[in-house]
Amino acid sequence: MFDLKIIQKEIIEQYLEEDSRPWIIGFSGGKDSTMLLQIVWYALKSIPTKSLRRKIYVVCNNTLVENPKILEYTDKVLKKIEKSALEQSLPIMVHRTQPQLEDSFWVNLIGKGYPAPNNSFRWCTERLKINPTTKFILEKISETGEVIILLGTRYSESVNRANSLAKHERSGRILKKHVLPNAYVYTPIQNIITEDVWTYLLQVPSPWHSSNKELVTIYRTADGGDCPLVIDKSTPSCGNSRFGCWVCTVVTKDKSMEGLIENGEEWMEPLLEIREYLNFTRYDRDSRLPYRRSGAEGVGPYKSEVRKNILEKVLLAQKEIQVNQPNIELVLYQELVAIQVLWYRDNIFDFSVSDIYNSIYGTTISFSEKFNGLKLEKDLLNEVCKESPEDFKLILDLITIQKTRSMLLNKRGLNNDFDTKLSRYISEKVG
């Protein structure tokens, strides 16, 4: 068994160091980050109130595609942390991060047609995890000059995590330099083994009045491991058995979701089916365009029909789940609007997000009212270019590029888009 008093003594000494650098604690709701926060919390309780000057931010990132069961548990815990910190006069503040709209999973996968991620093309990690947390850390660095990031990373958790820790190690130093400028990493529980983590959590009550037994039950039910706060590219993926994104196709099998379903959470079965479909499509050549988004030859993004199929599956699953889980949203309204913009950008006019959504939900919602002019322009061009359909497609593509760049308030690269489209048109003409 580890010596808790030694760890708490070190934390107290570090906290009372004569500097104002805030602490940023990465919190995922899993066993390691829960243990870390508990130990820090109890250490702070032993410090006189007048000496509690250093601010502590508990940062939890929501990728917007988190396992719904885990997200529900984590949200409940974060509310208790906020409430208890205020009641106990501790300088602990909770901050939730999430990807920007243009970086979200569905906007990129359904909107732009990015294939489901794999180990060689893990486009999701930076957009969903690294960027949101990095943005918050950099904001704090800008305010205070430097920050200290506390992580519940442990050597015994996996070889990859041990290697990641060793990368930042400095002999004899408690704080390690992080890849971000003016940021340091502190890992108080790095030498604790997994068995001792569970022993601690079951023996020491949560200071924010949560239930560690509930956490144990979730792990047993889901057969899961932590998906750590990801703050740089050296942080390893979650592994084969983890709590993380329910859409994750980087792993071979999602044992945590399968475990939850086997133990009574049958409502999650549609999520597993979508994940399996995504896993299939990323390797299916018939699901992909023969050129990349840059215009270069090679296996490219999903075809429009596949994007439509994925959106239908997600919305159907969402509707089915909301019968008994009304608060669960698999895709946000803002994402649906952004997807429609990107479909216009890619000259997808044969179907719309509104039509798909309304056919499933029986509503009359429009996600594209401001873009109806594009369809009118398409019909007019079609009439003018009856005898030259290839010219019609070229002109429409160029207009669509310009219009959607304006809609997205991002005109960078517009000339390159035009050049790519014209080059492909000329090569097809010559060929």
Image (cartoon, rainbow, N blue to C red):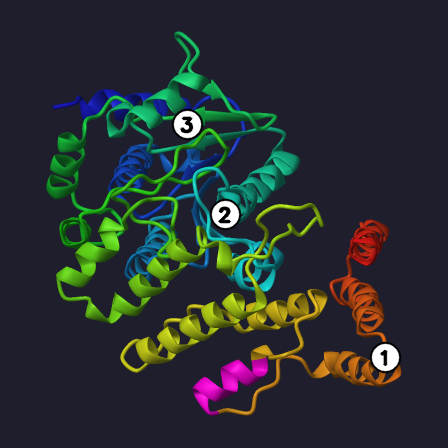
Marks 3 and 2, how far apart at CA: 35 Å
Q: Is residue 383 above or below residue 405?
A: below
**Which residue is painted at 26% across and 67% down in the image?**
269
Q: In screen coordinates, is 276 left or right of 126?
A: left
Residue at figure coordinates x 15%, y 40% from the top left = 204
Cβ atoms under marks 3 and 1 closer than 8 Å: no
Q: Earlier in the sequence, mark 3 or mark 1?
A: 3
- Check residue 15 in the rendering and tell me which mark sits there, or answer none: 3
315 to 72, vertically: above or below: below
Q: Is residue 259 shown left or right of residue 125?
A: left
Give yes or no for residue 359 being in the magenta stretch. Answer: yes
In the rendered image, the quadrant that contains the N terminus is top left
User: Which quadrant would residue 195 be assigned to in this image?
Assistant: top left
Q: Toward the viewer: 175 or 264?
A: 264
Neighbours of disc 1 within 10 Å: few (<14), some (14-19), many (20+): few
On the image, numbered disc 1 is attached to which residue?
387
Task: Read off the residue under disc 2.
Answer: 124
Nearer-N-terminus badge (3/2): 3
How many numbered tags mark residues here?
3
Can residue 75 be seen here? The reply is no
Q: Is residue 302 left or right of residue 62?
A: right
Residue that sits furthest to the front in the current view: 431
Instruction: Write the start and end of the magenta stretch as one range.
Output: 354-362
Residue 363 location, x and y as percent?
50, 91
- Of circles 1 and 2, the one toward us is 1
Mark 3 residue type: Tyr
Going from N to C along the chain, the mark reached first, 1 or 2, is: 2
Question: Dot 3 lies on which element?
Answer: helix
Q: Nearer the viewer, mark 3 or mark 2?
A: 2
Task: State the image coordinates of residue 191 (x, y, percent, origin top left).
Answer: 25, 21
Between disc 3 and disc 1, the foreground one is: 1
Q: Amino acid at mark 2?
A: Cys
